[in-house]
Amino acid sequence: MSQAFVAMPFSRRFDPVFEAIRAVCDRLGVHALRVDEVVGVGDVYQLIEKEIARSELVVADCTGDPDPRTTNPNVALEVGLARALRKYVVLLTQGVDSLPFDLRTQRALQYENTTDGLSDLRRRLHPVVRVILSRNNGGNGATLALPPAEREPEVPYLFLRTNDRGHEEYRAGRDGREVILVPGGIYYGGSPAKPIHVAAFFIDKYPVTNQDYWRFVEETGHAAPYFWDWDQPGREEEPVVGVSWDDAAAYARWAGKELPRSDEWEKAARGTDGRPFPWGDSEPDSGKAAFRSLFGQGPARPCPVGRATAGASPYGCHDMAGNVWEWLDEWHVPARARALAGGSIASEASSLLASARLWADPDRVDYPAVGFRCVRRLGPAPSDS
């Protein structure tokens, strides 16, 4: 039987919280082991490490005791052990102040220790645990429910407008998202910049949102994201995070699109004139991008897409610097590391450069600031050079 290790304060006031967690685990056929049940002869932390190693996932309530605004140091240590052992960790808290400082940018399920609050916690925790179990058992939903031969016919794109940058915007036929036509031709990309030719393509105006991704999940039966708490007000329009490269590629296939190649993404971000940032050569600020400043300040979680309007690219694409890193269709180390572009809420200004790249494990789903957008390639088209 699978096991979930539950790290939480020993106080009896947390018994109802554990019962809520155990009820979710019981429904999914998982044994919930509470940390204070780990007893025996020997070093207690060796015993805890052994049980975490045996577990499919760790549910960690970081709420302090007796002061819920403080961090529980024992739980923080157990979270560290779990991450060192590459275990999925679900963070719970009664207040964001109780999260360890280095986990403040992580998604956490916030709850109230009341009858209604714990009922709501059970409702939101269930799909998260279910997704983790499916991934650990190889059922990560990377394959579409419909094989390619049975996909729905292509739906034409609908012209919407010519935007204030002079570029055409359309409504994508399958997923209904707004896309921008990037003409084919030369742009100056890379570092140092050099001329690169790219054929015409459509690209999503914004990163894929929680609301967009949920429609895909409902229609295909694909696994929900690792971080799944978007039904709280305002989170529908945040970029979806907690998705692997395969998850992003599956969404793109369902939508009749692809993930962008590095040169496509960079051209859409910086235009043809070799500018370093989407908006030009001035330094980033909060009106242009959601990112971490040199003083460690910045948003604690991804922002609704399109909020940093002054940071739009020459084609009118939003959030191509900051907010979330975006998966690209490019390997760094074959079968081991995929490319990411754009920077995130946790990035410094240098990572917001259109030429900057990060490399990440394509199978990981617990990155709290990695999302994606899609493209649709058109082949040769009128040149913009």
Image: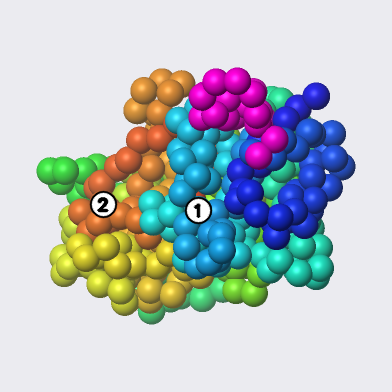
Crowd around label 1: few <14 · some 14–19 · many ≥20 (10 Å)? many
Q: Residue at x 80, y 70 (%)?
A: 116
Indicate the quadrant containing the C terminus: top left, top right, bottom left or bottom right.
bottom left
Comparing 385 with 84, the one in front is: 84
Q: Quadrant of residue 137?
A: top right
Q: Nearer the viewer, residue 63 or 195?
A: 63
Tell me which residue sits at (48%, 33%) in the image. Answer: 81
Q: Is residue 226 visible?
A: no
Q: Which residues are magenta?
A: 36-56
Vertical comparison of 145 with 325: above or below: above
* Magenta stretch contains residue 176: no
Residue 23, percent from left and from top: 83, 47
Which residue was labeled with disc 2? Answer: 351
Predominant SS of the magenta segment: helix
Residue 238 x %, y %: 54, 65
Q: Is residue 52 left or right of residue 382?
A: right
In the rendered image, residue 52 lying in the magenta stretch gets the answer yes
Marks 1 & 2, CB-CB < 8 Å contact:
no
Which residue is tagged 1?
A: 72
> Taking 58 as reference, is 81 left or right?
left
Three-letter code, disc 1: Asn
The quadrant of the image that shows the N terminus is top right
